[in-house]
Amino acid sequence: MKKNNYTLIVDAADLLRNLHDPDWVVVDCRFSLVDPDWGDTEYKALHIPGAVYAHLDRDLAGQKTPNTGRHPLPSSEEIMKTFSALGIDDSKQVVVYDATSGSYAARLWFMLKLYGFKNVAVLNGGFIYWHMQGYPIEAGENHNSPVQFKGTFQPEMIITTRQMESLVGNEKWRIIDARSAERYAGETETIDPVAGHIPGALNRFHELNLGADSLFKSSAQLKAEFEPLLDMNHPENTVVYCGSSVTACHHIVGMLLAGFPMPKLYVGSWSEWIRDPSRPIKQDKNP
């Protein structure tokens, strides 16, 4: 049987079969925007055996400044250090999970892809599905032996704010907002100080990638749902964003599962776009 070949998602049963394989690294990415310590606390109380923990604010985001969004990417040096500390190198198969079927875990998945790492997969259904199957769990805290992560940053996978400014109104590009319909429309905004969306952006809530069972929908269904949003002559000309470039990564997984080219991630996302009041915004509030 082939090893180290999961690059998008992995089913819980497949992880269970490989749970004690020393070449597999399992990373718990549970997090809550309203309670940043929640994920770490939950991890220490209950997690998949052998899993290590990565905190969104501390490990998967860099230092915020007045000009950045809420979760800017760390520097390359910081990313290399974090991945090395998690025990990730080219010999490993990495599995990432959270409590929301991948909406936070996909951030780490994307960061690894951004540095050329192939064998990383989001756990289909996340921790809740794993627990519901009666699969093993443990308490405490794990730390993998540090290794030397080597990767090459691929800037073509991301879009900067300056680049996004030039894409607004460009009919050759599709911009997809992964936030809820209410936040996209500007009807409500509980996280960022300004409501609305980038002009021209289309809305698809990232949770629509999942079925009622919290598992990813089939490739065929995802293809049918994403297709109307894309320019099918140039599906690669697609940018995804959200509030801070975290849940938008879930769309990247979904689009690849659907068989489309990898879209680009607007790293600054909405929370960076609104830092400059001169940038245009659109609201679709109900009268």
Image: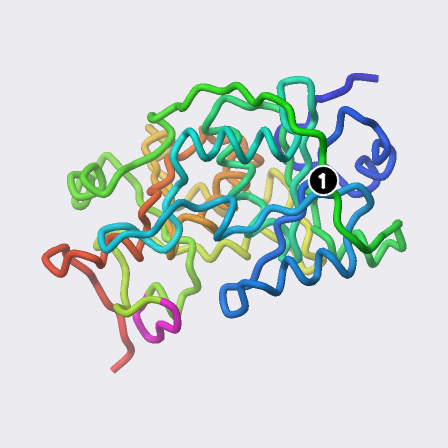
Residue 36 in percent (x, y) is at 53, 63
Residue 107 in percent (x, y) is at 51, 43
- 227 magenta-colored: no
Q: Nearer the viewer, residue 106 or 201?
A: 106
**Residue reaching furthest to the bottom:** 287
**What's the colour scheme?**
rainbow
Please tell me whether the stretch drawn in magenta is mainly helix, strand or loop. loop
> Which element is circle 1 on?
loop
Q: Which image quadrant for residue 82?
A: top right
Labels in figure, total: 1
Residue at the location (55% across, 57% down)?
207
Q: Nearer the viewer, residue 131 or 263?
A: 131
Residue 279 in percent (x, y) is at 14, 55
Which segment did they paint magenta?
185-191
Q: Nearer the viewer, residue 90 or 10?
A: 90
Quadrant including the N terminus: top right
Tag 1 residue: 143
Q: Amino acid at mark 1?
A: His
Residue at the location (63% across, 59% down)?
39
